[in-house]
Amino acid sequence: MTESYVCIDLETTGLNPRRDKIIEIGAVKVENNRIVEKWETFINPNRRLEERISALTGICDEQLSKAPVIEEALPKLLALTENNILLGHRVLFDYSFIKKAAVDGKLSFERNGIDTLKIARKYLINLESRSLGYLCSYYNISHNAHRALGDAEATVELYQRLAEEFYEQEKAEGNRSLFVPKALTYHVKRDTPITVSQKEQLYKLRDRHKLIIDYDIERLSRSEASRRIDLLLAEFGR
């Protein structure tokens, strides 16, 4: 059984790593089944949060406004997870957001992972739900829900409980065992920076219509800038 790994969890602005952004990272490093390090940070997503995300997580724009951007926080996360197995509840979701950020930063992020959700779906089929919150309630695991570090800490304990209960059964599966780390795969293209012409158009639209823009134009990607321009033109015209 894998006894050394890094459990990661993210809070994000939405579910699509190509369009949405990380707003909080939580990581718990485990060696020989003992927690040896914890790390958490807010991430400035360069956009205002939707009310539903703030309501779900309790995170507000004021907390994120002075937080590091992902380019500043990513090296710490990559170093923490280097040569380590990733653990997560639906781990590919978190991996996909980090992989997207790494690719945009021209960095490599290839890892193997273990997914507690897959284990729960196989062995706890009679439960009403296999969500992290429901499983924590089922196993009486303390859980600070929808906060990155709280979810990561709970997932570590959940993994250990699942291993105690089901690892011996899974050993018969050999390399197919859900407790054996598998390569995580997510294919994504790098976003290119905003173009000069896009910057000029956004600044002109801002000034012409006397708009208060709550994002940094200079930090937009080309695709983000294109969406912003389309939205402004649709609402205000040229």
Image (spheres, grey):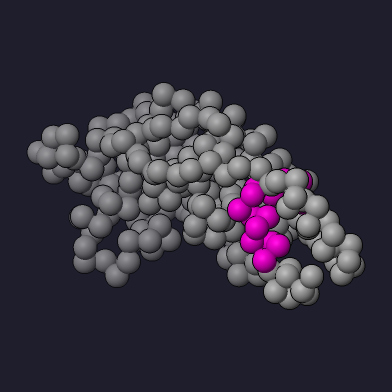
The answer to if 2 sits in the magenta stretch is no
Image height check: is 196 above or below 231? above
Residue furthest left as drawn? 172
Residue at screen point 75% across, 45% down: 196
Image height check: is 90 above or below 126? above
Q: Quadrant of residue 7?
A: top left
Percent x, y of residue 234: 70, 74
Magenta-drawn segment:
217-230
Left or right of residue 208: residue 113: left
Residue at screen point 69% across, 61% down: 228
Percent x, y of residue 227: 64, 61
Residue at screen point 13% across, 43% down: 169
The answer to if 221 sits in the magenta stretch is yes
Image quarter hosting the N terminus: top left
Residue at screen point 67% across, 66% down: 230
Percent x, y of residue 207: 89, 62
The majority secondary structure of the magenta stretch comes to: helix
Instruction: Out of 8 and 153, give the one closest to the viewer.
Output: 8
Image height check: is 118 above or below 73? below
Image quarter hosting the C terminus: bottom right
Left or right of residue 229: residue 153: left
